[in-house]
Amino acid sequence: MIVYRAFFEPGVFGWPEHACRGCSLGADQVAHLAHLNARDTTLAYASRAPQADIARLKARMGWEMPWYTMTDGFDADFGVNEWHSHNVFFRDGDKVFRTYFINGRGDEAMGTTWSYLDITPLGRQETWEDSPEGYPQTAPYKWWNWHDNYDAEAAPDPKWVKVSDAGRSRLQKAGRRGESELKKRDHFVAFEQRLFSHRSRASASAGARSIMGEIRRKYRLDSSATIILEGLAFTVGVMWIGRSNPS
């Protein structure tokens, strides 16, 4: 369970018509809780305002998260008596552990299903994560659903499984292309470093032609690209002069 300490009570700016402006902005960002609940996780708000005032505020603002009234020292015990924050609690059998705490500017990033799941001990509960043996995990994407359909559909729809598999395959291919581009970038950085290690313009130009040949062979460039590389090699002398004699 993720508990957010919201300031809505006597003495807070906006009372009794509104909660704290910052807390209210955060409440406007909260994603539909059905997605959290599908991961056996939930979010609750807590304030010192009476339930009648909380119900009125939620109706006015269109908020649907569970919102409780604190009547004991919970806020002081968990460091939320003076500032808004999120506490994460994890139940394991009969034991409850406080596993995460974030406040201040860190609260501003909260609101999406992913931001909430990622601060819990078991995360998104997907197979790529490192969770203790025996704890729930499912394949990525498969558990996603419409927020009004989790109860009606206990197992992933076969059509959705097919769609998500195709999407994941495209993402993996895009990732491999990205890795290739990074390697090319590193190659050109090394190329620049080698160029400007030369002590003369003529030496730099000759070195550029040698490196251009390496690049042409490595990336199997066609004739038009070769012409461009030759032009780059020609300009290396000018680059070298500028590097060696800055204005």
Image (cartoon, rainbow, N blue to C red):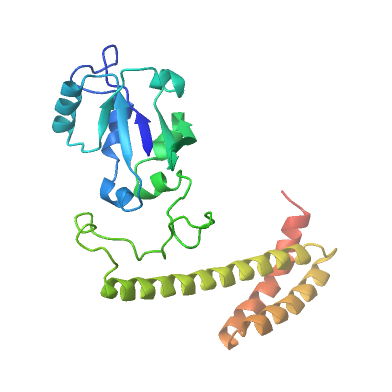
- Residue at x 76% of width, y 66% of height: 195
Left or right: where 183 falls relative to 155: right
Left or right: where 22 falls relative to 57: right
Q: Give the percent coordinates (x, y) of residue 242.
A: 72, 57
Is 158 located above or below residue 24 in the figure?
below
- Residue at x 48% of width, y 75% of height: 173
- Residue at x 15% of width, y 22% of height: 52
- Residue 26 appears in the rendering: no
- Residue 188 appears in the rendering: yes
Q: Give the percent coordinates (x, y) of residue 39.
A: 36, 52
Q: Give the percent coordinates (x, y) of residue 34.
A: 26, 50
Q: Which quadrant holds residue 81?
A: top left
Judging depth in this view, the residue of 183 and 120 nearest the camera is 120
Judging depth in this view, the residue of 188 and 117 nearest the camera is 117
Q: Residue reaching furthest top?
A: 11
Q: Where is the N terminus found, in terms of image quarters? A: top left
Left or right: where 117 falls relative to 162: right
Q: Give the percent coordinates (x, y) of residue 154.
A: 26, 63
- Residue at x 62% of width, y 81% of height: 219
Is 112 located above or below residue 61 in the figure?
below
Left or right: where 219 falls relative to 60: right
Is 120 located above or below residue 76 in the figure?
below
Q: Residue reaching furthest front?
A: 94
